[in-house]
């Protein structure tokens, strides 16, 4: 996110620890611009936190130039004695069970949307909220005659925090973006930011439906159609690939992850000169469905805002076999090659992966592609207890663990993302 030439990373005030020294400048958002709130190298005290909270500030901003400093800060506060994880794996503020409850309440009742999809000056008939990990705050309220009208504000695209709607308003939101999409079609526009932002949003809706009803026969058809659209989009123009990847939501959702893994896999497959039909389509379908088994896992574990215990991690590992079971009824509809991406994306070259401890070329190409892009997307996604790594840092980690993966593919993957300009950091952390 930029203002003039400066780019900012948004940081929830929950992530700042009282009585620490911040070696980066802190900025805050006023109604029209971002201003400096506190110079670097000053202590962050109870009073500072109170001051922010009195002014209703839940998110502060740090210059992109200080990214390394804020990440070191996260690391040091995490390792600091006062930030020890509870035995259930929670750090502040989630070591308070009430906060965990609030987190899940927000998670279950709200649906994050991409703010690019709301056009300034247009009318909407659903409420929009600013969303942090724990709380929401009303931002646009069509039911209220006052300042929060039904008109999308001019500065909507400058908002630094996540925005969300009530889950029950999803149909109204879908209607709104479909009207926008129709207008784009009339103008023959299939390359604007808005076009891609709507495509991403609609793709996530489709994947969400698939994950909610994974056993239905229609699921595979819907998934197949979506993979055709995504493959067509990527093959049409290489630059489209990075537009599909743009991450604007701040939380982990299996549907966002599935969309990213699918786009990244098709991108890497294209780099490897795989044929569209059947190769890219089979790879894409497997990648889209790779985590389908996760819908059988308790949300409290799957989206736990803390480090998993060993037992919980074992339960998560069960998603691979659960996915296989779920797709049994539709086995004739899924090409065998697609199943490799689902069954083998957690296998490692060293044989230390799961569920079958396969080694080297026992792992199918689609399993090897899946493993790399899955790891990469997990690293570059923000979680309530961990910040997203920049693509560059994610590559450093991938290189560190390269023995677990197909090294030749890692190389191709880096070349591919480099071409797309994705080595730059995501706009929103
Ligand atoms: Fe997985
Ligand atoms: Fe995954």
Image (cartoon, rainbow, N blue to C red):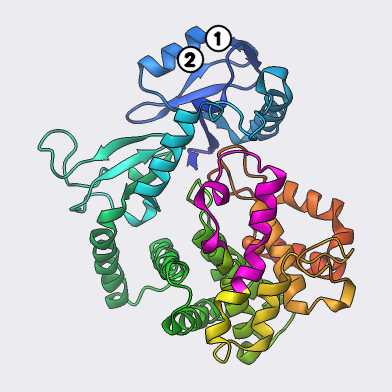
Q: Which residue is mark 1?
A: 45
169 to 42, vertically: above or below = below
Distance of label 2 from label 1 (alpha carbons): 6 Å
Near mark 1 (Cα within 10 A), the count class, few <14, some 14-19 or many ≥20, is some
What's the mark number on residue 388?
A: none
Q: In the rendered view, would you say 410 is above or below 314?
A: below
Q: Main secondary structure of the magenta part?
A: helix
Residue 132 visible somewhere in the drawing: no
Q: How many marks?
A: 2
Residue drawn where x is 73% and y is 65% of the image? 371
| Magenta-colored span | 294-323
Counting from the top left corner in percent of width and height, residue 307 is at 65, 40
Residue 238: image location, x then y, percent: 60, 73
Q: Which quadrant holds residue 236? A: bottom right
Q: With 296 as the anchor, is 261 left or right in this view?
A: right
Which sits in the foreground, 58 or 2?
Answer: 58
Residue 37 picture location, percent across and down: 48, 18
Residue at the (53%, 38%) spot, across then down: 5
Left or right of residue 359, residue 270 in this image: left
Position of 10 relative to 314 (above/below): above
Task: Identify the image quadrant of the C terminus.
Answer: top right
Residue 141 vs 117, above or below: the answer is above
Secondary structure, mark 1, is loop
- Mark sitting on residue 49: 2
* Residue 112: % across, % down: 40, 50
Q: Is residue 68 magenta?
A: no
Quadrant assignment, res 87: top right
Q: Secondary structure at mark 2?
A: helix
């Amino acid at each position: 996110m930029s203002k003039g030439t400066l780019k900012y990373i948004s940081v929830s005030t929950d992530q700042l620890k009282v009585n620490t020294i911040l070696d980066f400048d802190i900025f805050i958002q006023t109604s029209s611009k971002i201003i400096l709130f506190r110079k670097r190298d000053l202590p962050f005290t109870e009073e500072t936190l109170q001051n922010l909270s009195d002014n209703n500030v839940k998110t502060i901003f740090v210059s992109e130039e200080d990214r390394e400093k804020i990440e070191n800060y996260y690391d040091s506060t995490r390792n600091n004695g006062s930030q020890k994880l509870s035995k259930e794996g929670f750090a502040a503020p989630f070591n308070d069970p009430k906060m965990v409850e609030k987190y899940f309440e927000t998670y279950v009742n709200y649906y994050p949307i991409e703010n690019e999809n709301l056009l300034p000056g247009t009318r909407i008939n659903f409420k929009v909220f600013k969303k942090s990990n724990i709380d929401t705050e009303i931002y646009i309220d069509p039911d209220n005659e006052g300042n929060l009208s039904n008109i999308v504000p001019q500065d909507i695209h400058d908002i630094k925090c996540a925005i969300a709607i009530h889950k029950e308003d999803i149909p109204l939101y879908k209607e709104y973006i479909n009207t926008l999409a129709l207008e784009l079609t009339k103008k023959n526009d299939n390359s604007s930011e808005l076009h891609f932002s709507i495509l991403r949003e609609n793709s996530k809706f489709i994947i969400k439906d698939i994950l909610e009803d994974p056993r239905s026969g229609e699921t595979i058809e819907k998934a197949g159609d979506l993979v055709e659209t995504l493959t067509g989009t990527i093959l049409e123009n290489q630059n489209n690939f990075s537009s599909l990847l743009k991450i604007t939501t701040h939380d982990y959702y299996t549907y966002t992850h599935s969309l990213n893994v699918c786009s990244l896999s098709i991108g890497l497959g294209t780099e490897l000169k795989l044929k569209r039909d059947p190769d890219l389509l089979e790879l894409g379908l497997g990648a889209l469905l790779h985590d389908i088994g996760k819908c059988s896992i308790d949300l409290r574990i799957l989206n736990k805002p803390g480090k998993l215990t060993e037992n919980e991690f074992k339960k998560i590992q069960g998603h691979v076999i659960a996915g296989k079971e779920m797709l049994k009824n539709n086995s004739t509809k899924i090409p065998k090659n697609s199943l490799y991406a689902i069954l083998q994306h957690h296998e490692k070259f060293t044989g230390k992966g799961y569920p079958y401890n396969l080694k080297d070329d026992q792992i199918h190409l689609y399993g090897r592609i899946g493993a790399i892009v899955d790891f990469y997307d997990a690293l570059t996604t923000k979680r309530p207890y961990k910040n997203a790594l920049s693509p560059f840092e994610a590559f450093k980690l991938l290189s560190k663990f390269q023995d677990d993966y197909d090294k030749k593919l890692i190389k191709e993957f880096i070349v591919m993302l480099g071409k797309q300009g994705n080595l730059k950091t995501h706009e929103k952390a």
